[in-house]
Amino acid sequence: EVQLVESGGGLVQPGGSLRLSCAASGFTFSSYAMSWVRQVPGKGLEWVSAVSRNAGSGSIYYADSVKGRFTISRDNAKNTLYLQLNGLKTQDTAMYYCVKEAKAAWGTYFDYWGQGTQVTVSS
């Protein structure tokens, strides 16, 4: 059974930092690209960042809204995905989800989601 369990969210002041973690199990973590996606209540999903199977030699991508402030990483030995959030803004307040990527003949999609961890940025 695939499981993605996020942790590390919380309440932080603007300009502060958090580190989110996602513990993965039930699949070969090192074989799949992973992403972070966030959702503000009442609004749609926003893709935040993605990392290829091997972050050391692969590709890392960020949404323009977080580029330069957030850093995605992964530890394949620990089956864990991370997201370092620095320079947090009130508009970063959202539920953050860890998602597993899957490939189909027609393209790439997210097939498993964690339960989410809440990040609240407020003074």
Image (cartoon, grey):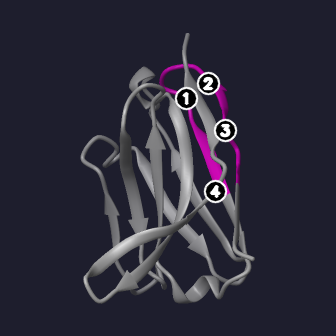
Single out the mark in the foreground, 4 or 2: 4
SS category of the residue bearing label 2: strand
Residue 60 in percent (x, y) is at 36, 70
The residue under label 4 is 114
Task: From the top left corner, tell me how far across and down residue 102 is, in percent.
Answer: 45, 79
Q: Residues at badges 1 and 2 in contact (C-beta under 8 Å)?
A: yes
Q: Residue at 69% of width from left, 76% of height from top? A: 79
Q: Is residue 98 left or right of residue 107?
A: right
| Residue nearest the observer in this picture, 30 or 39 | 39
Mark nearest the camera among 4 and 3 is: 4
5 relative to 1, above or below:
above
Q: Amino acid at mark 3?
A: Gly
Q: Specify the amino acid type for callout 2.
A: Val
Say which amino acid is labelled 4. Answer: Gly
Question: What residue does disc 3 label?
Answer: 9
Q: Quote the CA–CA distance across marks 1 and 2.
A: 6 Å
The residue that mark 2 highlights is: 12
Q: Is residue 13 magenta?
A: yes
Segment tinted magenta in the rendering: 6-21
The location of residue 31, given as percent across then percent down, is 54, 89
Q: Residues within 10 Å of mark 1 (few under 14, many from 20)?
A: some
Question: Is 100 positioned to the left or the right of 50 in the image?
Answer: right
Q: Earlier in the sequence, mark 4 or mark 2?
A: 2
